[in-house]
Image (tube, grey):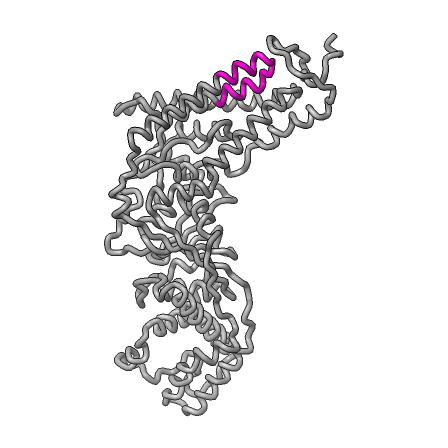
Amino acid sequence: MSSEKPASYGTNHFDPPVLSIASSPLGILFEWVALIPLMIYLAQAGISHRLVGRMALVGRMALAGTIPASLFPRLGVLGGIASLLRKGATDYLDRASSVSELHRTVWDAGWGSVFPCANGAASDILTQHAVRTAVDIPIPTDLGELVPEYIDQEIQAAEQYKKRGAAVVASEVKSAVRDGARGPGMRRPQTLYIIDCSIDEKRRQAHGFRASPQAAIWENVVKAAVLLALIGTTAAIILLGLYGTAAALLISTIFRVSRLLIQVERSQGYLASNEPDQNDACMLVAIHENANTWYLYTGSRGVVDWLLNKSMISKVTSRGGGDNDDTNAATAETTALLLYALAVLQLGTMTYVAAQKGWDAFGLLAIVLCASLLDHALYSDGRLAQRWLRAEHVTMKAYACRFSGRVPMIGVIQMRRKGATSGSPTSWMDQIIAPSERRDVWLRKLRRSASASSVAAEAAAGQTGQRPFWVAEDGRATTEKEKNDRIWVQNNFVLTRAAAEAIDTHMGGCLL
């Protein structure tokens, strides 16, 4: 009777059709193992975000390659690929890059624009790979030491101011120095990772990333061998009566065939800058404007702009359609329907095994573990980043800076970027630091101090002996708000100056 069958035969108690299989009465073991694959493969939030990011990094210059999944994809991946084929790359990429918990904002300090980060998780994968070896840059934060050092120029300017008594003005400025030095040096620590990107365009164009005929032949041989091995293993598993495991292997086989039909194409002008007069980028990235960790991308504008702003994938189509758009659309629709069917079959297979239990549970668990190991070996974030950097001849160097507050961090970016002038846009920082009079004064002080010959420049412009901004006109006493603003400007000015000099020292004197 079926009730006498061992627990290893599963819930349906079917005997193996051909080959015998070991039996075991440990029912709790099989029930427990049956749940593990389903728990491992439960669909995760933001799977489209990760899928798009990995697709953008797989492959070479002309083609992004194929789908970054080796054997048995996670729940949701098959449906995501099908949606990508049906909706088109542009719409799917926009949605994938807007996933709420993974959405990141970009502030372009060079052009003053603010926009959402493109390409899903691609930039995050590369960034996390780069920051693992980030060089720490110590940022001075002790106001007691910094304020007297950097404010001497303001005292000299105050002593030249003749509209009020020089001694009175100098005394007021020195009082500001003392008040500022007593102010808190640590308010809200911020971490800034500077990602300096460069590209060897000559090597990139010279190599062309064309695979040799021998490499292409070996690649096709390996693909054929894997398919034959999957088919043979599926047949053997069926003879053992492990139908759930056999269905999973069948899904893997069909999925690998469908991967060969999907073509992911790069956009035209990939990694090239469309601004010939501006070769250097300066883009700040964070999860939102109130973040504690920030990433500043500098260097090659072509690399940074394509990574953060432009889609690295132009379209995803099915092979075999030729140049006929109607044929391509029909082929893509057919492939999408096949993937949708596989997604339904995958869910049915995993829930069937969870209900069936028995040796089927161990078989599916083995497939899941093998797929996870292969994905980690072939498509882990670190491996994808290394392959992309090597294939595109791109170098990303990371530096870690820890500021005492957000204002000095933003000031360093605005002050030290290449091409910064009095007419440089400041609108990009409005969401981070609200516009105010004291912000304007602080930025003006930074612009004046950015020039090594600022004193000579001011003298030539007839600005020598100007009234310091915090000194009231006509002998009027400064208000408490004016004193607080004075200290705010003073402290953030010296913190910004000290941070900029520290970064220049560690990065060869030319950061942004």
Q: Is residue 83 left or right of residue 391?
A: right
Q: Quadrant of the N terminus?
A: top right
Q: How many marks?
A: 0
Residue 334 picture location, percent across and down: 39, 20
Task: Say which quarter of the image contains residue 450.
Answer: bottom left
Above-or-below relation of 438 to 317: below
Task: Say which quarter of the image contains residue 246.
Answer: top right
Q: Is residue 22 left or right of residue 226?
A: right
Q: Is residue 381 left or right of residue 509?
A: right
Task: Please report the bounds of the magenta region as a residue range.
Answer: 232-252
Above-or-below relation of 149 to 504: below
Q: Is residue 402 left or right of residue 154?
A: right
Asked whether residue 477 is drawn in magenta, I would say no
Which of 448 and 78 lies nearest the eye of the viewer? 78
**Residue pictured at 42% horizontal, 57% vertical:** 194
Residue 110 picture location, percent across and down: 33, 58
> Magenta region's main secondary structure?
helix
Residue 103 picture location, percent across and down: 47, 45
**Residue pictured at 60% horizontal, 28% vertical:** 37
